[in-house]
Amino acid sequence: MFKFIPHIVIRDSAVDALCHGADLAIPGIVEVDTDIQKKDSVAIMTLKGEVVGFGKTTCSTEEIFQKDAGVCVIVEQVYMKKGTYPPIWKKH
């Protein structure tokens, strides 16, 4: 289903936050397909190749590599079940 959509691979520590409704921030990224542009649809994947969800980018591949912080994907749909990966983030 996601074969022809650009991929962004995320850290294990970011997975559960996305499953609980967070958008994807740059520090959570491990790998990005080339030629992603702002407002592109992307698949958000784990390091194991599992689909976490789907979203729209707020910046290009180049901008992701230039920045250290900030949201880079607005998550539109999450497919992974909450708790599949242990929560690393803290609730306030």
Image (spheres, rainbow, N blue to C red):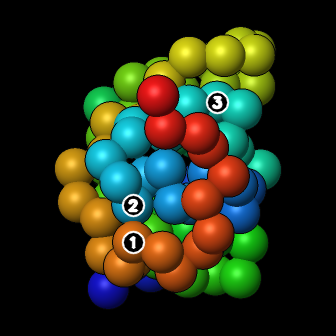
Confirm or deny contact between disc 3 and disc 2 (CB under 8 A). no
| Foreground pick, 72 / 28 | 28
Chain-order first, disc 3 or disc 1: 3
Name the residue tied to disc 1. Answer: 82
> What whole-number distance in Å separates the C-alpha atoms at marks 3 and 2?
16 Å
Instruction: Answer whether residue 1 is visible to the viewer in this image.
Output: yes
Q: Nearer the viewer, mark 3 or mark 1?
A: 1
Circle 2 residue: 19
Give the SS element for disc 2. Answer: helix
Q: CA distance from mark 3 to mark 1?
A: 21 Å
- What amino acid is labelled 1 in the image? Lys
Q: Looking at the image, is mark 3 or mark 2 earlier in the sequence?
A: 2
- Judge by depth and name the residue closer to the eye, 75 or 85: 85
| Residue 30: mark in rendering | none
Question: Secondary structure under badge 3?
Answer: helix
Q: Amino acid at mark 3?
A: Ile
CB within 8 Å, label 3 to label 1: no
Give the quarter of the figure containing the N terminus.
bottom left
What residue appears at the point 48 percent right and 75 percent down from the top-left corner? 83
Location of residue 39 (image quadrant): top left
Q: How far across and down, in percent of the image, does residue 33 sit?
A: 64, 52
| Local secondary structure at mark 1 | loop
Q: What kind of residue is marked 2?
A: Cys
Q: Is residue 48 left or right of residue 77?
A: right
Circle 1 packing at 10 Å, graded few (<14), some (14-19), many (20+), is some
- Crowd band around label 2 with a 10 angstrom C-alpha radius: few (<14), some (14–19), many (20+): many
The residue furthest left is 76
User: Mark 1 or mark 2, which has the lower sequence index?
Assistant: 2
Q: Which residue is mark 3?
A: 26
The image position of residue 42, as x and y in percent, is 40, 54
